[in-house]
Amino acid sequence: MITNTKYSGVISIAIIEDIDDIRIPMREFLSSCAEFLCDIDASSVEEFLEKYRDDVQLDVILLDIGLPGISGLGAIQLIKERIPNCLILMSTIHDEAEKIFQALKSGASGYLLKDTPLADVKNAIVEVYEGGAPMSPPIARKVINYFNKNETKITAANITTKEKEIIAQMVDGMSLKMIAANLGNSVETIKYHTKNIYKKLHVNSKTEVVAKSLRGEI
Amino acid sequence: MITNTKYSGVISIAIIEDIDDIRIPMREFLSSCAEFLCDIDASSVEEFLEKYRDDVQLDVILLDIGLPGISGLGAIQLIKERIPNCLILMSTIHDEAEKIFQALKSGASGYLLKDTPLADVKNAIVEVYEGGAPMSPPIARKVINYFNKNETKITAANITTKEKEIIAQMVDGMSLKMIAANLGNSVETIKYHTKNIYKKLHVNSKTEVVAKSLRGEI
DNA sequence: AATAAACTCCCCCCAACGTGGGATTGTAAT
DNA sequence: ATTACAATCCCACGTTGGGGGGAGTTTATT
């Protein structure tokens, strides 16, 4: 990685936010911090991409999620392609789980609600730059709940040992015939067990069993 | 929920930690905070379960992950069963991704590294009590990276948009007929695309496509 | 001794799936 | 203009899978 850092220790940032009443004070505040160099502010992704110069290092982008034109969500991938080493800190008014996960999957490194005080935004930028993943508390809770949900049901259905073996084979893409061969049973035996598995999991196809299993819902 | 809170606004906490040099100062510090009531400290899960009385409300448990006997990881489920409304804040020296995810899946609500300053531990307890999910920065980064990984490889094989739609339907457990209905095509069209999907992914069943997809191998 | 709960295996039936062709349209690239 | 390819459909064939039965074993629990 080639570093074009102007002054070591200074974090180069950009702000993309369409609402002037948020963007302008934000830029003024962050520019006043000795830690930051606010090279760019833009009211849209399109504007940002015009202003951005590839030879200038950019460390962190503060990106609004609800932008006109290219949405913040779509922008993540664009930005990551063009500036792979740039960290993206999302800022949003909504705290919809869907959008949060989409953003994180696309490559965002942190997630702030718009009511975050400026001082905390400053800390968040430093934290993300230092390898953390700042999230406003309600966001963080949603993220960890994502994990919770999945495995709470682990004891839900009482899957027997044999059934677990069969499920494992299914996940490996085996046909019932192959499972029978692998486990030393007749196909009919495997069929019998799959019927019970389906009843316990409330599904009616191998595919759904595999999906549930890989999602950790078994 | 029946609250047995002794004084409103006070957070009732417990500490489970086997190392005296950590547990004792921790308890002293937290007890000195007006916000907390530290009812219980224990050097093992077994000891905690003995000391715990069901009629006394407990809001937050600070739980060491590497305990002798019942591990902190195993303890999460035990505690959640007995005290469902109690929040669990894990504390650990390791930051292994595996254990973090296991803990979060089991029901932990936050995750601190053991080098966290006492003042920050205090803030973390308040944060988790107020609905947040405090995580030490390296932990938070691991958690968000978990999301990143899953969707980066989507461009590996050159799967077309249509094919992606169909794969998504497969993952949702749809039959080819249902997929056809949902996407407004004939079953034959869906069959045509599945053939191509199978060739591209080198598989020969829906089940394997679902498995690959959920493993992030597409 | 009786009951329940896994596990084993068999039958039939029909729907769903996987594989092999082939035909047509439209669009994008050369 | 030609090639290439995604996308839309169709037919036919054999295999696999899902649902409904039933019958026997063992093991553990009551």
Image: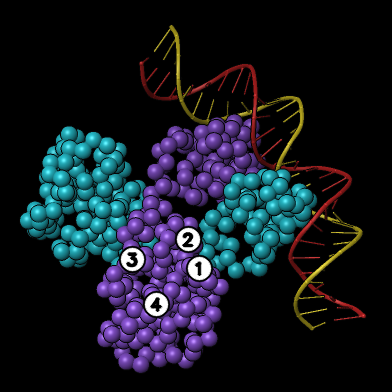
Chain colours: A purple, B cyan, C yellow, D red
Which badge, 2 or 3, is on the more N-terminal residue?
2
The CA distance from mark 4 to mark 1 is 18 Å
Asked whether, in this view, residue D2 is left or right of residue B32, the answer is right
- Which residue type carries mark 4? Arg
Q: Are marks 4 and 2 on the same chain?
A: yes
Tell me if mark 4 has few (under 14), some (14-19) or many (20+) residues whose alpha carbon lies within 10 angstroms of its own.
Answer: some
Which badge, 3 or 4, is on the more N-terminal residue?
4
Which badge, 4 or 2, is on the more N-terminal residue?
4
- Measuring 34% from the left and 78% from the top, which residue is drawn there? A25
Residue A99's disc is: 2
Which residue is more in the foreground, A52 or B191? Answer: A52
Mark in the foreground, 4 or 1: 4
Q: Are marks 1 and 2 in contact (CB under 8 Å)?
A: yes
The residue identified by callout 4 is: A23
Residue A73's disc is: 1
Up/down of B217 relative to A125, above or below: above
Q: Position of residue A214 (x, y in %)?
A: 50, 50
Which badge, 4 or 1, is on the more N-terminal residue?
4
Tell me if mark 3 has few (under 14), some (14-19) or many (20+) residues whose alpha carbon lies within 10 angstroms of its own.
Answer: few
Secondary structure at numbered mark 1: helix
- Measuring 21% from the left and 38% from the top, which residue is drawn there? B3
The residue identified by callout 3 is: A115
- Measuring 50% from the left and 77% from the top, which residue is drawn there? A44
Secondary structure at numbered mark 4: helix
Tell me if mark 2 has few (under 14), some (14-19) or many (20+) residues whose alpha carbon lies within 10 angstroms of its own.
Answer: some
Residue C30 position by quadrant: bottom right
